[in-house]
Image (spheres, rainbow, N blue to C red):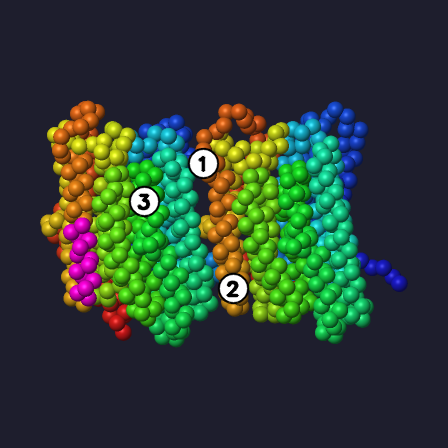
């Protein structure tokens, strides 16, 4: 698209990955009392990362379905570990989503976080490196490095800046994640022993030709990988850490958690579990899809009865990500395209919802639905933005949520009508609990006097919410550029799965 | 008989010799100053110790990574890379302990030259232990270092519990030496009077059941030193009662040098399936008991004691593989693990020393709000704990990766799985200090004394080394592999 940039031959992917980490190191040298500088510097660093991501899009060839912009260097030669990055249709949108949301998250923390600003910005930057690195890594140990590197900053963000039960929530988050990742680690080592490489493309090739895995091996390895990712998603019944983590985390933590971190799970399924162990994935398709459907309905039902807005959105995440897991296990281009779009859509809509809950929490210091009501007249601007986010989350045609859900349900109905019917109930329930929440939250009479004086959105808040709205409409009205980026990869991917 | 000593033989004992002389110089330099002077920091002692240790380290690595020049002193010791790596770990640990001593001892009005000298003597003996290649020199080195450690453990002689701990350590240590000696006698008897490792390996006494019993007895003797279950009962008590610095010294140097010697012994003698099974059992029980018992500890030193037992369990996994004959190259993870463990543990004990300066407190709750008061120490301890838990970007992760990779590739999947599960348990207690430091607010009742410069230096260097080895471990991995290959020939 931008041919003159290609001649520079920049290591674009490394730049995207490492800029936040380098920024974090630079930030550690800034005086901790200079909060304004810390905040602006972190914002600039994340904007720079976004710029590099756009450079990546510029160099990304939509016609190619294999890995692009690859970078491979030996790293720990004696242990067979290499520094191998690459991007394809599965990861490109997720990287973009991450680097798109982070500047907005940083902007949102200017008013929300006033204690230990320096540590917060550093933690968030390190988290960003972890997330982008995990999406781009093509060496299993390198992936594990980034995957685990996300853990500590997120743990600190929940534990230091979280709510009253933050220590419990942080610990639960940490332990749950560790259970999965340690077993996955063992599985990675076993794969290395079996195939003689940590390099993902090479490993895939060897498993499909010279080093096939037996059914038992496939089953156990698939289970180890999938357990780790299912906890991250989170898939029912491994979801119990999520409501705690979300409710206790500060706004920025919730946004990153819902917006990006959960996608690590579904991305992992698509990138590792399913292609590496496709026989086991096919055998266990029923189990996984049923769990996903139970998650869709269970999450929606739980969301119906919540009084805490954050908890409600947290359970809606369980429900929405059920669709993505369902899509991952339907081997058709439409389903997986829908799944990837749904990951992005969920990141946008839920991220924005959490940001907006954070905004109202800063003003009223409560998240109980009963404490609100009638805000629509007091803060009309807020109400409009909130409604857009909610409608996008529901999947209203014209907004982004519709495209992903439609593609998924279309593909599921075609091959598995029963699952299609059951999953569709999730859409209906979604409209029910979200609109019900809006009714109690923003409309109706004003019960509490404090709600009469709530301030509407400030300019800074509009600045960081507007990009979300733009993206929602863009994805909803004209998703073709995004689908085109994804499609060639998925055509090859589904072909490989079916062979 | 004409006695000739070759240049290589002199070079081989030079590092240890420098340390013994350094210890003597320290003792003499402090003569007649023991009156009221025990509160001053006495930087000259640390200076002498530091200079001596640096000199010894230089003497150790003057040969670079050159392969072994063969057996020296009629097969009593060697100067191969493996031994020098062991001596290197010990001496670096000694260097940091010496640097930390001044501030720590002065604050408890107990700053005497003996402490520094004992560390030097002990380090010299440990260097010899790592290089020892026959049973006699192993025993002499172990006894020498043990005597020094007994005294260090009971260094605060006015403190009843410290004296009790030291006495306990002494009695059990004497027992373990008895086991060791008896085992050596059995091996001597069954191999037709061989004492050097290579003779034992070459002899035909290995099928003898008495030989197996002898190996087992030696293993028991070493198990006391490395704190493996069921010979671990002294560890928590002694760790809790002894001066924090002496504990750091024990936790790193005693364990490292004993492991180097044990590893060399087992690489030579092998041992067969029965011994491998016994070792595997010890390893599993150590991992389980160490990690489970650590869950309930409020005292940081006790927690580190149990965590040390657990790490002994992890370190035994490669030895199981070596002994079972499934792949001697698995032994390469031992030097690496010990280097990583030394850097990590020293950083942790540096911070524990810093908070116990002048107060002798080591409760987890004493760390409350440390990230606000002393962000630097908090970051150091956090890195150390992350590394102990084996989380990426730290040396501890690569160390665990090597051990597990060895276990998986030699078919010891169960051991690897138990290691993984116990690691998960360990995450819980390693996070507890992190919670206290970062998530809780400082308690006003407890004022922190500024950390001594030696402690800050140690924490900084060791924490940076932990991260550096975690990201660029290649050179150390190669060095460890090379060192084990030189033994195997």
Q: Are marks 3 and 2 in contact (CB under 8 Å)?
A: no
> What residue sits right under mark 3 in the picture?
A243
**Left or right, A330 with reference to B161:** left
* SS at circle 3: helix
Image point (22%, 41%), residue name = A353
In this view, the residue in front, B94 or A326, is A326
Which quarter of the picture shows residue B228?
bottom right
- Category of crowding for the residue at label 2, using alpha-carbon neighbours closer than 10 angstroms: few (below 14), some (14–19), many (at least 20): few
Stretch of the chain drawn in magenta = A416-429
Depth check, mark 1 against mark 3: the one in front is 3
- Please check the rendered image and state whether residue A38 is part of the magenta-colored stretch, yes or no: no
User: Extreme right residue here?
Assistant: B1
**Left or right, A403 with reference to A55:** left
In this view, the residue in front, B458 or A149, is A149
Q: Position of residue B155 (x, y in %)?
A: 72, 37
In this view, the residue in front, B110 or A489, is B110
Residue B414 disc label: 2
Marks 1 and 3, how far apart at CA: 23 Å
Marks 2 and 1, how far apart at CA: 36 Å
Which quarter of the picture shows residue B187?
bottom right
Main SS category, magenta section:
helix
Residue A498 appears in the figure: yes
């Amino acid at each position: 698209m931008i041919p003159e940039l290609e001649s520079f031959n920049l290591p674009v992917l490394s730049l995207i990955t490492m800029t936040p980490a380098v920024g974090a190191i630079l930030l550690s040298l800034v005086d901790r009392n200079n909060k304004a500088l810390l905040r602006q510097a972190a914002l600039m660093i994340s904007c720079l990362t976004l710029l590099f991501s756009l450079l990546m899009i510029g160099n990304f060839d939509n016609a190619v379905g294999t890995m692009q912009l690859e970078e491979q260097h030996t790293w720990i030669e004696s242990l067979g570990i290499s520094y191998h990055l690459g991007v394809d249709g599965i990861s490109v949108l997720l990287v973009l989503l991450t680097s798109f949301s982070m500047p907005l998250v940083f902007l949102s923390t200017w008013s929300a976080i006033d204690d230990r600003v320096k540590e917060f910005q550093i933690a968030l930057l390190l988290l960003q490196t972890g997330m982008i690195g995990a999406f781009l890594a093509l060496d299993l140990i390198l992936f594990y490095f980034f995957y685990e590197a996300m853990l500590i900053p997120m743990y600190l963000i929940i534990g230091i800046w979280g709510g009253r039960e933050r220590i419990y929530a942080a610990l639960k988050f940490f332990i749950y994640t560790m259970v999965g990742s340690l077993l996955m680690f063992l599985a990675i080592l076993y794969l290395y022993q079996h195939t003689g490489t940590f390099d993902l493309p090479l490993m895939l090739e060897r498993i499909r030709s010279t080093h096939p895995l037996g059914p038992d091996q496939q089953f156990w390895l698939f289970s180890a990988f999938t357990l780790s990712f299912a906890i991250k998603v989170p898939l029912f019944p491994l979801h119990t850490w999520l409501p705690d983590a979300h409710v206790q985390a500060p706004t920025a933590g919730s946004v990153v958690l819902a917006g990006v971190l959960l996608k690590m799970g579904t991305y992992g399924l698509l990138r590792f579990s399913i292609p590496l162990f496709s026989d086991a994935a096919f055998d266990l398709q029923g189990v996984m899809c049923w769990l996903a459907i139970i998650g869709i309905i269970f999450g929606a039902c739980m969301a119906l009865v919540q009084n805490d807005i954050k908890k409600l959105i947290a359970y809606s995440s369980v429900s929405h990500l059920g669709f993505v897991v369902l899509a991952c296990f339907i081997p058709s281009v439409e389903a997986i395209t829908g799944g990837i779009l749904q990951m992005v859509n969920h990141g946008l809509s839920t991220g924005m919802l959490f940001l907006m809950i954070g905004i109202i929490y800063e003003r009223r210091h409560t998240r109980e639905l009963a404490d609100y009501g009638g805000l629509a007249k007091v803060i009309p601007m807020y109400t409009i933005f909130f409604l857009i986010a909610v409608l996008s989350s529901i999947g209203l045609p014209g907004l982004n949520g519709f495209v992903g859900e439609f593609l998924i349900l279309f593909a599921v109905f075609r091959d598995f009508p029963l699952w299609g019917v059951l999953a569709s109930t999730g859409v209906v329930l979604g409209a029910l609990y979200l609109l019900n929440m809006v009714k109690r939250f923003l409309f109706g009479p004003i019960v509490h006097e404090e709600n009469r004086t709530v301030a509407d959105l400030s300019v800074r808040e509009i600045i960081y919410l507007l990009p979300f709205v733009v993206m929602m409409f863009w994805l909803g009205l004209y998703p073709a550029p995004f689908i085109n980026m994804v499609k060639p990869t998925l055509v090859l991917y589904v072909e490989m799965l079916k062979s | 008989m004409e006695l000739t000593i070759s240049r290589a033989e002199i070079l081989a004992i030079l590092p240890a010799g420098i340390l013994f002389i350094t210890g003597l110089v320290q003792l003499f330099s402090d003569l007649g100053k023991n009156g009221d002077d025990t509160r001053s920091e006495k930087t000259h002692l640390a200076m002498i110790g530091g200079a001596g240790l640096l000199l010894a380290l230089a003497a150790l690595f003057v040969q670079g990574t050159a392969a072994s020049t063969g057996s020296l002193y009629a097969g009593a010791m060697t100067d191969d890379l493996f031994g020098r790596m062991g001596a290197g770990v010990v001496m670096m640990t000694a260097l940091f302990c010496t640097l930390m001593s001044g501030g720590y001892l002065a604050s408890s009005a107990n700053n005497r030259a003996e402490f520094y000298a004992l560390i030097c003597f002990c380090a010299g003996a440990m260097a010899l232990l790592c290089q020892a290649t026959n049973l006699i020199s192993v025993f002499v080195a172990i006894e020498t270092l043990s005597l020094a450690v007994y005294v260090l453990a009971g260094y605060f002689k006015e403190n009843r519990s410290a004296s009790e701990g030291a006495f306990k350590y002494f009695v059990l240590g004497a027992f373990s030496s008895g086991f060791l000696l008896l085992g050596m006698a059995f091996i001597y008897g069954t191999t037709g009077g061989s004492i050097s490792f290579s003779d034992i390996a070459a002899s035909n006494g290995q099928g003898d059941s008495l030989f197996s019993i002898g190996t087992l007895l030696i293993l028991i003797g070493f198990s006391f030193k490395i704190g493996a279950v069921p010979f671990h009962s002294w560890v928590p008590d002694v760790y809790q009662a002894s001066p924090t610095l002496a504990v750091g010294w024990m936790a790193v140097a005693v364990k490292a040098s004993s492991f180097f010697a044990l590893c060399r012994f087992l690489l030579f003698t092998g041992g067969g399936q029965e011994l491998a099974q016994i070792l595997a059992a010890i390893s599993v029980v150590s991992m389980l008991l160490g990690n489970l018992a650590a869950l309930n500890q409020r005292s940081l030193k006790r927690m580190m004691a149990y965590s040390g037992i657990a790490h002994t369990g992890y370190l035994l996994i490669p030895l199981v593989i070596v002994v079972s004959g499934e792949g001697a190259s698995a032994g390469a993870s031992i030097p690496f693990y010990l280097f990583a463990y030394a850097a990590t543990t020293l950083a942790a004990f540096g911070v524990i020393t810093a908070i116990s300066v002048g107060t002798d407190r080591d409760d987890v709750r004493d760390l409350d709000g440390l990230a606000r008061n002393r962000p630097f120490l908090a970051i150091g301890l956090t890195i150390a704990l992350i590394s102990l838990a084996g989380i990426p970007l730290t040396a501890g992760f690569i160390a665990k990766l090597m051990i597990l990779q060895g276990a998986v590739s030699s078919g010891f999947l169960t051991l690897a799985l138990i290691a993984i599960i116990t690691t998960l348990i360990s995450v819980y207690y390693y996070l507890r200090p992190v919670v206290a430091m970062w998530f809780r607010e400082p308690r006003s009742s407890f004022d922190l004394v500024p950390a001594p410069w030696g402690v800050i230096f140690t924490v900084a260097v060791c924490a940076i080394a932990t991260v550096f080895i975690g990201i660029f471990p290649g050179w150390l991995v190669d060095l460890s592999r090379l060192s084990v290959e030189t033994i195997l020939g």
